[in-house]
Amino acid sequence: MCGIIGYTGVKKAVPILLAGLAALEYRGYDSAGIAVQENGLKVVKTKGRLSLLREKLEHATHLQHATCGIGHTRWATHGEPSDVNSHPHATAHLALVHNGIIENYAQIAAFLTERGYTFLSQTDTETAALLIDHYYKEEKEPQKAIFRALQMLRGAFAFGICFADYPDRIYAIRKDSPLIVASTEAGALIASDVPAILPHTNVYYRPEEGVLAVLEKAQVSFYSAAGKQVQQKTERLDWNVEQAQKGGFPHFMLKEIHEEPQAISRTVSAHLKDGLPYFGENFPTEVLKSCRAIHVVACGTAMHAGLIGKRIIERLCRIPVRVEIASEFRYRNPILEENDPVILLSQSGETADTLAALRHAREKGVPTLAIVNVNGSTLSREADHVLYTPAGPEIAVASTKAYSVQCALLYLLALHAGLARGQISAETVREICQKMQHEVPESVEKVLEMNDEICGCAKELTDAEHVFYIGRDVDFDLCTESSLKLKEISYIHSEAYAAGELKHGTISLITHGTPVVALSTVPALAGKMLSAMREVAARGAMLLTVTTKQIAAKEELPADRLLLLPDIDELLAPFPAICAMQLLAYHVSALKGLDVDKPRHLAKSVTVE
Ligand code: F6R
């Protein structure tokens, strides 16, 4: 999704804006631009990668001394990626960057057309820029103009705005879209996300919705719609610049997969007390003890982590769990019984659909718990309760370590609930926690050591047009995530199937050489998986069999390629298994020479519906 950066201070703005945009590249974009204050507002923007913007700016030497400006990476929603649709959008008085969607842009466009305005672009954003321009001409003052325009705007937005008449200032405001503001000795900044400001500071404000930030070189002030100055709280993130860089790995995705052992062990250690799961004094254990069902709501990979959570919670606690896609949940009028908690999973904590689902659940008055990776994100602030997954920054668009730690936290929740409900003894819980803290990270390390072998298997898939993933029980859930990982970064069509379901239709697609990845980590179902593998092998499938050493020792498994996962308690097998599948997808994409970290059309943080 779009990325916003802004700087006003004593340093040169262009390099700071470009570095900030580079740090936000992970969000996904198709065009980029900046506006700086240099004898009036000057805009440079282009369709395509940041390197093109950099090239254009090399020729704009007259802008190099500017010390105030805003920048943007655009992820097209209204209007194709093009120079003219790129941000900033400028008028004679102002330049504006926007992340979000103005839902009533057509109505605003009609309002402006009646008043003589014409439009250069097809974007919703230009209507916001012109609307503020309209009120600026009436009010002759930025603050009043912005607030008057806001009364008309519907939808989600974070704006960064520069006015030509105020060459050292940036104005910024948000509603339902992320925005942070920071003040340092060398100047003030705005950004969509923390990595963009980390080289300058790790302390920042996250302005409340509808509060206007006014940034000047030496200070930042905040104002309510009534024009009153208000205080905002600072937040601090313990991530450093190094963590947000590649650290010698060719891609963020590979680096983040390699961070899984530490991330899992950190997540488990952070939520243990006396060897048992502990989530703080205010955690609603009573709700988990008495509820009759649990809802887990999320999108994409986070939703797939929810499927793993469902398996483990139902297994250990015997509470029915319903996992739902957030964008479906919110419009479905779901049946939410009093006291049945809704758990929202999200790496970013800013996903628009998950946020809307949370708000729906809160409106219905049921308890809500957010599990998020980004401290202070909107989801974490709006949910009744929040648990953090201390995975550190996840920059690659394809989520990997965030999935593993979400699963780890759901395991701990399941153990906690199982204990509270008397379904499982403290001794067993302690034993599993101990294994999660030590054996799980060790087994994931062992998978990382299989990198070359996994890369060898990936070579078999690079020319494929279709890949099928099959598994049963929890392996099927892992297949859904493995399949998503492959398709999103390698652009190979893939499907995940419950192995027993293949013969009810899909097996007709298996012909000579069709790649099938068969995942088998559940000993009790190994025999059943064997039948499914034989069925596809008999139809000529190219079979990549992924199983544990223990299962392989018992069964003669058909396989064109065999990947043997390290043995671990069956309950914990999903952790090494998913690491192997993530590496497999990674290598297919890297071998194909694709942009692994920034796959086409995708955005890291999906802040629009
Ligand atoms: C896929 C991926 C997405 C996200 C989804 C939710 O690799 O990353 O499917 O999982 O967009 O994002 P968060 O977790 O930030 O809510």
Image: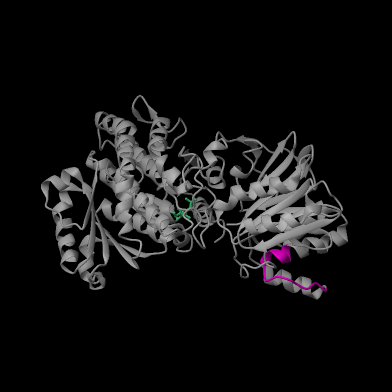
In the shown orientation, is residue 37 left or right of residue 128? right
Out of 478 and 371, give the one closest to the viewer: 478
Q: Is residue 371 above or below residue 48?
A: above
The residue under the point 13% across, 54% down is 527
In the shown orientation, is residue 565 left or right of residue 95? left
Does 497 appear in magenta? no
Does 123 appear in magenta? yes
Res. 516 in view: yes
Q: Position of residue 65 (x, y in %)?
A: 80, 47
Q: Position of residue 403 (x, y in %)?
A: 40, 47
The magenta stretch spans which residues? 116-128
Q: Position of residue 90 (x, y in %)?
A: 77, 62
Q: Position of residue 563 (x, y in %)?
A: 24, 49
In the shown orientation, is residue 520 left or right of residue 399? left
The prevailing secondary structure element of the residues shown in magenta is: loop
Quarter assignment of residue 214: top right
Name the image quarter holding the N terminus: bottom right
Out of 249 and 139, give the one closest to the viewer: 249
Out of 400 and 143, give the one closest to the viewer: 400
